[in-house]
Amino acid sequence: MLLVYSHSITPRLKYIFKHICTRVLGIEVDFTTKVEEFIAHDRLKMSYTRQQLGNEFFIRSNDILFEQGITDIEIHVHDWGNTKCFFYNGDKSALPFDIFAASFYLLSRYEEYLPQVRDAYGRFLATESIASKFDFLHQPVVDIWAYKFKAKLQEQFPDFKFSERSYTIRPIIDVPCAYHYRLKGVMRTIGGVIKDLIGFKLKALYNRFLVLFGFKHDPFDTYKYVINKQKQTRFKFLFFFLVGGYSTYDKGTSPNNKKFRSLIKQVADYCLVGLKVSFLAIEDIKVLKKEKLQIESIMNTSLEASRHSYSKLNFPESYRNLVELEVNEDYTMGYVNQVGFRAGTCTPFLFFDLDYETQTPLKINSYHVMDYALLKHKSLLDKKKVLNEIISEIQQVNGQFVPVFHNYTFSTISRWAGFKELFNIILESTDENA
């Protein structure tokens, strides 16, 4: 156990120390404000305060963990070996930066509480983030800093046995629309036919009728392929099904459709299943509650995980709604069109509500690449390069890689050519670490 001395034990301090020490490094941690108790402790210990007590392992603290509320903090980012960091704290500290304050800033999504430019869907932009502006979005810096902290601790406490974690993957299969042509209902099917005719999309019209009359496989029906892939790996895939109503933003299948319900149950026999929260439900907790009850009635079990349509987060209300409805995990944190680490980490972390200064039970699993972000790279070789680079970053800190693919990503549609091969790279990336 690591004993931490500080002049004040705040919720922020306890939250971030437990994340870095326990969740990332596997070290149990306790806290004290009593100097006598700290001195008497003869094992792993450190002080985290403004002034060093003696010659103990000491990290000089930044004020952010002892404050309340949100202020517009001036951030100065510096190079630190092969990475970057901020909240420089001088050369008397065991580390030149207060990694706990910097990690708290990133994990709490402090910057997303502040006013900023958003896109047409109301989403926080990657270009607005400190990680993008100072070019460290491509690294899981929180985990890298934690390992630097571990290395320093090992120097001072060589007899302490640190635990090791392993690289893992959690592939996400997002299903905004279960089928391209099937299960659309009479009116939507007629509307699709008319749209194809007006747009002179004769090939699409031909394929539509082939699928509807059972002569051809629906292009979005890739479930057998994904389930076969699931059988080949020990890491569970997580499917997110949309059960929300038809709207401007969402074009899903009715949750009352027996074949759609049967599909969800079939997938749940092999993979984990969560709720893809509709765009309207992001804004309205009553709609969210209805969708939660709908998918629970289909699966006949309580909902464990969610993911928002369009990866939209209304910060912090979105997470508060999930906490209120007792959803345990969320997979929305990430950027649709940008590869990288939105929260600076590849370790799941708990949502800390800055307005209420409290840690919540909601586990945030940030995703690191979405199939759409890879579309920006034209050649398959470039896509592979980008994918392998981010896998390598996560493997170096033995973190959890969360990629987001869609059911139609594995179709024969030309824009998704080569994506099955990219998915295989992800599945095979665990082989050397098995």
Image (cartoon, rainbow, N blue to C red):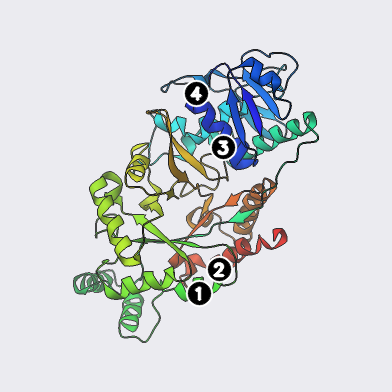
**Residue occupied by mark 1:** 225
Q: Residue at x 57, y 19 (%)?
A: 62
Which residue of the protein is positioned furthest toward the left in this rendering? 187
User: Sequence-wise, which precedes: disc 1 or disc 3?
Assistant: 3
Of labels 1 and 3, the one closer to you: 3
Q: Amino acid at mark 2?
A: Lys
**Residue occupied by mark 4:** 10
User: Sequence-wise, which precedes: disc 2 or disc 1?
Assistant: 1
Q: Residue at x 57, y 45 (%)?
A: 347
What is the C-alpha distance between the residues marked 1 and 3? 37 Å
**Residue occupied by mark 3:** 19
Q: Is residue 42 above or below residue 287?
A: above
Q: Is residue 108 above or below residue 165?
A: above
Of labels 1 and 4, the one closer to you: 4
- Residue 67 percent across, percent down from the top left: 47, 19
Of labels 4 and 2, the one closer to you: 4
Q: Residue at x 35, y 71 (%)?
A: 180
Q: Amino acid at mark 4?
A: Thr
**Residue occupied by mark 2:** 420
Question: Mark 1 and mark 2 in contact (Cβ < 8 Å)?
Answer: yes
Secondary element at image label 1: helix
What is the C-alpha distance between the residues marked 2 and 3? 35 Å
Secondary element at image label 3: helix
Secondary element at image label 2: helix
Question: Mark 4 and mark 3 in contact (Cβ < 8 Å)?
Answer: no
Residue 202 shown left or right of residue 228 in the figure: left
What is the C-alpha distance between the residues marked 1 and 4? 49 Å
